Image (cartoon, rainbow, N blue to C red):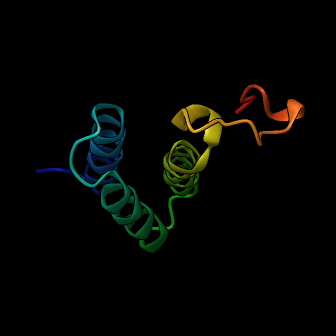
């Protein structure tokens, strides 16, 4: 029988794996983990879920990480520091 902590951790691990492999819906796994951690009032797992969601969001929107740089990119944005 899985504990609440194990269930949430499984969702977090799935989110990371899906995001790294560009498969599945990593965001859905992370948001599920966040909802469960919030309901269970587990602050460390809430923080972990928010961190994973931040990474997914960053990787989806960062022009540098996404390889979408063009001539309009300002010099201070030549590389990502996140």
Please name whichever residue, 80 or 53, is drawn nearer the observer in this view of the structure: 80
Residue reaching furthest to the bottom? 39
Report which quarter residue 28 is drawn in.
Answer: bottom left
The percent coordinates of residue 22 (x first, y second) are 29, 39
Q: Residue at x 54, y 32 (%)?
A: 67
How many labels, in total? 0
Residue reaching furthest to the front? 71
Please determine whether, in this image, residue 8 is positioned above or below residue 79. Answer: below
| 48 left or right of 62 in image | left
Please name whichever residue, 78 or 39, is drawn nearer the observer in this view of the structure: 78
Residue reaching furthest to the right? 76
The percent coordinates of residue 10 (x first, y second) are 26, 45
The percent coordinates of residue 62 (x first, y second) are 62, 43
Please determine whether, in this image, residue 62 is positioned above or below residue 53. Answer: above
The percent coordinates of residue 69 (x first, y second) are 64, 35
Quadrant location of the C terminus? top right
Report which quarter residue 20 is drawn in.
Answer: top left
Q: Which residue is drawn at 78% across and 27% down?
A: 78
Please name whichever residue, 65 or 50, is drawn nearer the observer in this view of the structure: 65
Q: Which residue is drawn at 28% across and 32% down?
A: 21
């Amino acid at each position: 029988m899985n504990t609440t902590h194990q269930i949430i951790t499984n969702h977090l691990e799935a989110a990371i794996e899906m995001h790294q492999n560009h498969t599945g819906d990593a965001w859905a796994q992370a948001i599920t983990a966040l909802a469960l951690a919030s309901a269970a009032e587990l602050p460390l797992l809430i923080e972990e879920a928010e961190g994973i969601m931040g990474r997914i969001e960053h990787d989806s929107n960062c022009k540098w990480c996404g390889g979408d740089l063009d001539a309009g990119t300002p010099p201070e944005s030549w590389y990502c520091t996140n």
